[in-house]
Amino acid sequence: MKGTRYVIALFFLVSVGIFGSCKETEAPVEEPVAAPEPQPDLSSAMQKVFDDFELVGMSVALIHKGSVAWEGHYGLANVKREDPIDGATKYRIASISKTITAIALMQLYEQGLVALDEDIGTYLGWQLRNPNHPEIPITLRQLMSHTSSLRDGQGYFNFSREMVAQELPIESLFTEDGDYYTVDLFDDRKPGDFFTYTNCSWGLVASIVERASGMHFDRYCQKNIFEPMGLKANFNVAQLEDTDKLAALYRYENGAWNAQVDDYTETAPVERRYGSYNAGRNGLLFGPQGSLRASTDDLIAIAKLFFNRGTYNGNTILSAESIDKMTAREWVFSGANGDTWEGFFNAYGLGIHCVLNAPKGDIIFPDRKMIGHPGIAYGLLSDLYIDPASESGVVFITNGSKKEYKYGKDSSFYGVEEAVFKQLYPYLKTLESANTVF
């Protein structure tokens, strides 16, 4: 059924969404430069997409040869205040957050503080095993490639609703004697055997980041990723410097835009970190699976980090070796070894979705197999995908549509995503043709 990706994504949100190596490049790229003025033809085409899908707001950027070739912003970040969207507008970018969480973990891997194939109980301080296969350890590599045999069961949703107020440890979710444990948190299949896209597992990754570093997850990312990159992103909305630049996420209900999250017109964000919180107790507090607030400019910087093989703003964030490990294909669909969401997921690395251009499936730009991540949450759709070989890429974000999201005709991306990609692709090819030397 074509609506599977939409239904599963909504199910994930009841309580609260780069492989063999993909493309590589050794050439550095220039750091941020001002985006060129939008070309009238592409601007009008994107305006039509915005109008046709009746969006509340939209940001789009096209990257060519490592720099922004075109950028456009449409509509409103906040309906009540009538705030227009621009490149600095921050969105809750949903599952693109997983890529940043993986970067944090890989930094600690480089320092020798964690190993990808070690039993995660070594780092958690308590044993976590699939009760259907108690003899098989679960590893960080499996957590970050969605092959750990963990699933987003009912316990996850119950835990998420109550973890702040009850100051819950994540152990109470995953151990059989825990108050929030449910049997549907674990698959019948062995760890490592089957791909099932999962959110709850990223709380374990973040908890391990905390225990290995001795820092709260949001503060670790702030100090070791965002500050050296010069980004204003944050996993803790209460710690953002300027909530006036934050886009509310909307669903259109009963003839009106209804904010689902991040409308702070009349209230301030609530701090999720409680006073007695100790690092490693529950990394899910900071939403490592989907709660990063970041702008289009921030996502472009992340794209350039991968183009530059781990460096940005003169700072090394990751080694080239770690970039290679993240972008290697840890899982590839063989026909029966995973849930592809109807052709959307065909390969996955460490916190990175790898596009294989399956017919009617994971197609963005049809002549290149791109790497990156999508997101969906509370009315938002987001995409960050790049091709390191050509240093091209796309950023797309919308904070809500009057229309129900439905799959496009030619891919397993939603129709609005497909429409954006189809407008950008010929423009990109024109740019590439103009730069061809004969």
Image: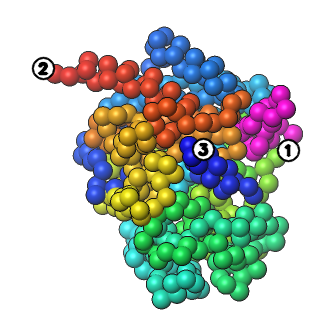
The residue identified by callout 2 is 438
Closest to the camera, between mark 1 and mark 3, is 3
- The residue depicted at 51 percent of the width and 16 percent of the height is 45
What colour-coding does the image apply?
rainbow
Q: Is 33 left or right of 396, judged from the image as shown?
A: left
Disc 3 residue crowd, few under 14, some 14–19, many 20+, Cα 10 Å: some
Q: Give above or below for 257 relative to 28.
A: above
Separation of disc 1 and disc 3 at Cα?
A: 35 Å
Magenta stretch in the rendered image:
247-267
Q: Is 117 left or right of 434, judged from the image as shown?
A: right
- The residue depicted at 63 percent of the width and 65 percent of the height is 152
Say whether disc 1 or disc 3 marks the residue closer to the N-terminus: 3
39 or 46, which lies in front? 46
Element on which disc 2 rests = loop
Q: Is 356 left or right of 172, judged from the image as shown?
A: left
Q: Give above or below for 342 relative to 41.
A: below
376 or 116, which lies in front? 376
Separation of disc 2 and disc 1 at Cα?
A: 60 Å
- The residue depicted at 30 percent of the width and 34 percent of the height is 367
The residue identified by callout 1 is 267
Residue 400: % across, % down: 68, 34
Find residue 183 and report its image quarter: bottom right
**Residue 270 in view:** yes
The residue identified by callout 3 is 3
